[in-house]
Each structure stands twice: as structure tokens, then as C-alpha cells.
Image (tube, rainbow, N blue to C red):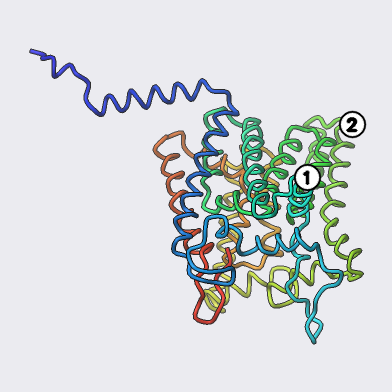
Amino acid sequence: METEASRRPSANDRAQAAAHRARTVVQRWPWYVQVLALWLAARLFSFAVLAATARFQPAGPWGGASPSYWNFINIWDAEWYSRIFADGYPASVPRDAAGNAQENEWAFYALFPLLVRGLDAVTHLGWAVLAPVVATVAGFAASLVIYRLFRLRAGHGTAMWAVVFVAVFPVSPILQIPYAESLNLLLLAGSLYLFVAGRYLTAIPVVALMCLSRPVGVPFALAVGVVLAVRFLRRHRVDFPAGEAWRLTGLAAAAGFSALAWPVIAWASTGDLRAYTDTESAWRFGDLVPFKPWLTMSGYLFGPLFGPLVLVVLVGAAALYLMSAPVRRLGLELQLWCAAYLLYLLVFLNPQTSTFRLLLPLFPLALSTAWLSRSRAYRGTVAAAFAVLQIVWVVWLWRWTELPGGGDYPP
């Protein structure tokens, strides 16, 4: 016989019912409120990770031990951006007695620090206040554009999960730190959205600004150029109207010119043709030789025999993934963007611990990751793993801990 106690819902049933009601309420919110709430939760988590880690920061190049959150996020390359904010760029490239370029501000693109300087001219709030605010607000804006980009290819639920993966990505704390990453993510997402939507002429000014925020212009121009070539070769099977072809050609040309803008600005400002490329080389202790850094690093980590083999396997695995069904579902434009950016990293990047941060522009792969399974358990596990790795990234790389030989691994 059923008793009153047996009819009473268990604690687990009540928890499930409460969770269901909460999901129902959230699902009634407008999409932009859902995205911003999700992003806010992710940024609060990153704030907690950064603030907790700051308590264990030893004294280092940027001040004493256990700094405040605000001082803790203004270290590493944030110091270079603050110098640009305060003093601009050097009139000439500093060089040693042998003529080798030394580390200087020309390695850092101007849009983020100059945007902060412009706001400071109006508000007089200074770098310490404005730089984190600009970076954080740009991240929130990027989340909305990323969602709209993903909705061009997927339904609301899958697009939201993909935004979750971007929001908690292991290096996502950088999106609230005075770096140019969040501003670049906003402009890159906007450029990709307009590119995928076929609004090629509208994309041109966004692409131009993007190319002044971080060095992603070359792979973007390559992706647009390859899409143009593919569309032209397929024109007998897939309609490619002349007007659309000319607009896409205009975007390809504009992207190519924009990709060269910063090196040209550095040249015009210093009178030194190699001002930008030599400055970039100052961080890699050698000339800017394509592919060489990856070969050198693979040999250093795995030996002269296995190093090249490991590199070939890594490149092969990346190529296979880019040709997989979930990535192909992204569409030609996003698939080629990811391929072009990975190729760019392979050709020019000096691989080190900063490489993790430089993977952020591959954010469209978050959507392909969400497509791998519709299971909430799978998607929740991925998000949780990213959150844990976020703690690892902050504690291992953002926190300064001087190595025995001096210095530390850069984030």
C-alpha cells in the first residue's frame, strides 16, 4: 500500500525539477541575454581563478608578492601595451652592437592601446582602469558576434554550447586581461560573420581594423583568396554571379593590403624596411625563417631522429581533423580560415608556451566540437575539462615563477 511518505518526491526529484524550471526560465530569455549571462558566468570564474592565483604570486619583475587582481592582470605583455599607451612607438628600432633588433614596441599592434588612449583623453581614467574594461567589454561584444556566426550554421542549442566552449577555453582569462586578444576576437568574429554571410564590401572596414589589432591578416587574406579561387573553379556547378565575384575579389584585395598595413606603418615610421620583421625576430633569437622554429623545437623536445617524425604526425593529424565531417559542416569559409591560420602558425610561429594563447583565433572549431555529440554529458565534460585546464594555464603560465636559469615561461 502506497504511503504518504512514499508519494513525497525525493531530494533528487526536487533538484531535477528545480533545474528543469531554471532551464525553462533561461530558455525564455532573448538570445543575447542568454549569451551575455553565460559569458558573465565564465568571466567571473576566470576572475576567481586569477584572483586566487594572485595570492600565491611571488615578487617578480612587476612588483611585490601577492598583488591585487588589477596589478596581477597588468603583467607580461600588458606592460608593453601600457608603454605604447603612455609613450607611443620608438622612432627607430633599437639594435645591439651587432645590428640585431632588440625587443621593442613595434611587435605589438596599435589598435588596442590607441583605443584605450582615446578613451582616456575623454574620461581621464588612466590605463589601469580603462585597459581591463576595454578588454572585458570587447570580450562580451565578441560573444554576441560569435553566437550570430555560429547560428549561420547551427541551431540555438548547439550554437550556445559552442559559445560555452569558447567562453571557458583554457586561455579564456586573456579575454579580460589588458591584451589585444578580446578586441581581435571581436573583429575576427565580425569579419568571419560578414564573410560567411556574403556581405563582402561591408566586411572590408572590419577586416582593416582587425589587421591593426593582431597579426591575423595574412591567413585571413589567404582564406578569402582560396575561397575566391574555389568559387571560380566551381562556377559551372554552383552559381557564382559576376557581381558577387567582383565583391569577393574586392574583399580579397582589401584583406591582402590590410595584412601588410602594420609592417608598412612600422617602415614608414622608422625608415627601416625590416622594422616589424626584425622586431618579431628579437623574440625568437634568430632570423624569421619559415618552418625553421618548428623543426628546431621538435628536434629539441624529441631529438634529431624523432623530432621531425613527431612534427609530421602532428601536421597530419591536424590536416585529417580539418577534413573531418564536423569541420566540413562549418562551411567552406570557416574551414579554410582554420586551415589558413594553422598553416600560418606552422610557417611563421616560434612554438613555445605562448602557442596555447595563439590558438584562440581557431574558435570556429568550438562549433565542430559541439557537433561531435549531442549528449549533455559529453558537452558538459568538455566544458568542465576546459575550466580545469584554465586553472592549469593561469597557475602554470600567467603566474610568474622564476626558473633556475632566470625568466619564466611566457603565457
Relative vertical location of residue 145 with respect to residue 135 in this rendering, above or below: above
Q: Nearer the viewer, mark 1 or mark 2?
A: 1
Which residue bears the numbered disc 1? Answer: 122
Residue 269 placement (x, y as % from top left):
89, 64
61 or 267, nearer to the observer: 61
Name the amino acid type tagged 2: Gly
Q: Which mark is residue 243?
A: 2
Relative vertical location of residue 249 with respect to residue 346 in this rendering, above or below: above
Relative vertical location of residue 14 with respect to residue 119 in this rendering, above or below: above
288 or 32, nearer to the observer: 32
Residue 302 placement (x, y as % from top left):
52, 74
Relative vertical location of residue 244 with respect to residue 358 in this rendering, above or below: above
Q: Residue furthest top?
A: 1
Q: Which mark is residue 288?
A: none
| Quadrant (top left, top right, bottom left, bottom right) of the N terminus | top left
| First-in-chain label (1 vs 2) | 1
Residue 53 relative to residue 146: left or right: left
Q: Residue furthest front?
A: 124
366 or 240, nearer to the observer: 366
Q: Are marks 1 and 2 in contact (CB under 8 Å)?
A: no
Q: Residue at x 84, y 39 (%)?
A: 248
Which element carries disc 1, helix, strand or loop?
Answer: helix
Name the amino acid type tagged 1: Val
Dot 1, how many residues are within 10 Å of its Cα: few (below 14), some (14-19), or many (20+)?
Answer: few
User: Which corner quadrant of the image does residue 15 belong to?
Assistant: top left
User: Which corner quadrant of the image does residue 236 belong to?
Assistant: top right
